[in-house]
Image: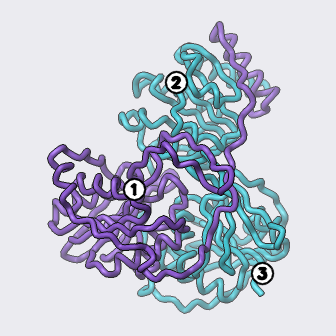
């Protein structure tokens, strides 16, 4: 089974977001960059499928030179090789999907796997848009997966509000991973050493011939407004509880 | 010229969720008299009256058996066909599990830009629609512009005001000539989750527990408070990772992002990822024994104290005041 896994490098979720006042962008100095947490579930599931059925796991990433660190980490988890589309341009979801799809279509694959969303822009679009670009079916937000290599059919369980559903679809397909699908492995030291020698093919973004203008742009970024200082109650638990309920009833009017 | 808003409705057994009322109301306020609702599936005809009440001037009801089972690619093809007939300037989707799957699929299929999970959609100076949406799970907000001729937005539940406008909901029939072979990914089975009473992303009040709860059995104390408040139950990430509660309870940057009227954080210290996931809450109430816990800086109200003493008394006080009211 050949699997392409789309990996994005994002700021660590512990990052305190500071804005760059002159641009609609965040300040990136001092940021710790990591693999998008949901993409880690996609990498892990791809590795497990390869361990079960044989084949190859190829990492496909898009972004500036720094992204190679995330790629090496995915290789250290066990991916076989990688393709890095290198470019500094800011792309929207549709632009990123077109670039990734362009690279994917030159590869042989049975599955394309990625995270359900990236935890930076939170658009949750690239998986679906790659699927549309390549005219493939999709199953998003997958928490459990069953694959029959003989019939080339996939059963994927998705999380809904207060329920789950099973989707059936044929291969090749695009899947996006949700927390709960698996527990991603940590790279071992020998695998980190091995990853340094694995092939990372670089493809300059501007050689892909993508000319489309951005469909969606960020005009302005703002920080959420600060809450007024909290009313903090201390002392006897019974009295504090009564006073809190009074405030919630009379002042906030939420009870 | 393209005009009006096509509101894509998720219905089951003739019933729609509250988010449908919310996005219809918003659409009617932005494009008065030009709102079309489209809904799919078995018993879809029963939604007509509700769709009109909350703002649909006309409705497209796709009741053919091929629409009885959800298919992201099939439904996106159908919506492409509906767009060709209705010619809307914009499409609205609910940003729930269903809409988050279908909106990007549809946007790609019709070649339109999508702003996901918006908390606000407004009509800008040039007459086009713009939106505000959270990024970094709510650590920042982006004002976004969509430049394609047709614009697509998904709207976060629990944010928009519901207005009953009592529109006509006139039925428009659209001939789509799709057949089952056009549908590749198909839902074959739906299972209700165990124990999940109220959905976090739709809940008006949430009671949430963190490591301060100390053991899974102690979640019962929170359940009492949640029952008294009519609240949904959530948790911080460590508690879900420990397996004390299912992953679906986890609120935060890599879990659920919520926007209730009141969020009650019990025994949660307030890691930055958790605070991001609750920043859309109108009121945050914190109960924690550590007066220096970061959660108090994010809260509107707080009690510093032992949650095992405070929470049962709080539950009783809530029951008392509700009885009096």
Horizontal side of residue B13 vs A128, given as left or right: right
Q: CA distance from mark 2 to mark 3?
A: 50 Å
Q: Nearer the viewer, residue A220 or B47?
A: A220
Chain assigned cyan: B
User: Badge 1, how many Cα within 10 Å: few under 14, some, many 20+?
Assistant: few
Q: Quadrant of the C terminus of chain B?
A: top right
Q: CA distance from mark 1 to mark 3?
A: 44 Å
Residue A120 locus on image (x, y percent): 52, 53
Query: Mark 2 vs mark 1: same chain?
Result: no
Which residue in the rendered view is the most extreme toward the top? A236
Q: Earlier in the sequence, mark 2 or mark 3?
A: 3
Chain assigned purple: A
Q: Which residue is mark 2?
A: B267
Pointer 1 indicates a residue of which chain?
A: A
Look at the numbered disc 1 and give the secondary structure of its residue: helix
Q: Nearer the viewer, residue B203 or A186?
A: A186
Q: Which residue is mark 1?
A: A66
| Residue for point 68% across, 87% down | B173
Query: Mark 1 vs mark 3: same chain?
Result: no
């Amino acid at each position: 089974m050949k699997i392409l896994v789309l990996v994005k490098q994002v700021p660590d979720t512990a990052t305190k977001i500071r804005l760059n006042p002159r641009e609609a962008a965040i300040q990136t100095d001092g940021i710790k960059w990591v693999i998008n947490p949901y993409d880690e579930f996609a990498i892990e599931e791809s590795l497990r499928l390869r361990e079960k059925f044989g084949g190859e796991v190829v990492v496909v990433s898009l972004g500036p030179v720094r992204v190679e660190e995330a790629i090496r980490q995915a290789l250290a988890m066990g991916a076989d090789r990688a393709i890095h589309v290198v470019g500094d341009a800011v792309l929207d979801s549709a632009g990123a999907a077109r670039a990734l799809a362009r690279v994917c279509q030159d590869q042989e694959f049975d599955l394309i796997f990625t995270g359900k969303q990236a935890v930076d822009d939170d658009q949750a679009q690239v998986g679906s848009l790659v699927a549309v670009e390549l005219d493939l079916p999709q199953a998003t937000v997958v928490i459990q997966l069953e694959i029959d290599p003989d019939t080339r059919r996939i059963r994927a369980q998705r999380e809904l509000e207060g329920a789950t559903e099973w989707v059936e679809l044929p291969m090749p397909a695009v899947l996006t991973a949700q927390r709960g699908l698996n527990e991603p492995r940590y790279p071992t030291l020998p695998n980190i050493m091995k990853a340094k020698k694995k092939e990372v093919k670089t493809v300059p973004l501007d050689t892909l011939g993508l000319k489309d203008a951005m469909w969606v742009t960020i005009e302005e970024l703002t920080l959420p407004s600060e809450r007024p200082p909290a009313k903090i109650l201390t002392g006897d638990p019974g009295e504090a509880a009564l006073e809190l309920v009074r405030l919630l009833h009379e002042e906030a009017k939420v009870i | 010229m393209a005009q009006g808003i096509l509101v894509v409705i998720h219905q089951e057994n003739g019933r729609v969720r509250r988010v449908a009322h919310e996005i219809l109301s918003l659409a009617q306020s932005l494009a008065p008299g030009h709102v079309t609702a489209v809904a799919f599936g078995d018993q879809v005809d029963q939604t007509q009256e509700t769709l009109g009440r909350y703002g649909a001037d006309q409705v497209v009801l796709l009741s053919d058996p091929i629409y009885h089972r959800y298919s992201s690619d099939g439904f996106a093809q159908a919506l492409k066909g509906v767009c060709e007939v209705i010619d809307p300037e914009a499409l609205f989707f609910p940003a729930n599990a269903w809409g988050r799957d279908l909106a990007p699929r549809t946007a790609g299929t019709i070649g339109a830009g999508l702003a996901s999970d918006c908390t606000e959609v407004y009509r800008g100076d040039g007459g086009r629609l713009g939106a505000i949406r959270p990024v970094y799970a709510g650590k920042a907000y982006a004002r976004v512009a969509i430049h394609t001729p047709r614009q697509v937005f998904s709207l976060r539940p629990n944010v928009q005001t519901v207005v009953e406008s009592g529109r006509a909901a006139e039925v428009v029939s659209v001939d789509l000539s799709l057949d089952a072979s056009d549908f590749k990914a198909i839902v074959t089975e739906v299972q209700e989750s165990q124990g999940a009473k109220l959905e976090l992303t739709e809940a008006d009040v949430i009671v949430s527990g963190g490591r301060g709860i100390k053991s899974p059995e102690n979640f019962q104390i929170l359940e009492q408070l949640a029952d008294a408040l009519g609240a949904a139950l959530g948790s911080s990430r460590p508690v879900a990772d420990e397996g004390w509660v299912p992953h679906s309870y986890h609120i935060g940057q890599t879990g659920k992002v919520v926007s209730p009227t009141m969020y009650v954080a019990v025994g949660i210290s307030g890691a930055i990822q958790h605070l991001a996931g609750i920043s859309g809450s109108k009121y945050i109430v914190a109960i924690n024994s550590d007066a220096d816990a970061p959660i108090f800086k994010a809260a509107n109200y707080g009690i510093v104290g032992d949650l095992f003493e405070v929470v049962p008394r709080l539950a009783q006080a809530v029951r008392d005041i509700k009885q009096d009211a």
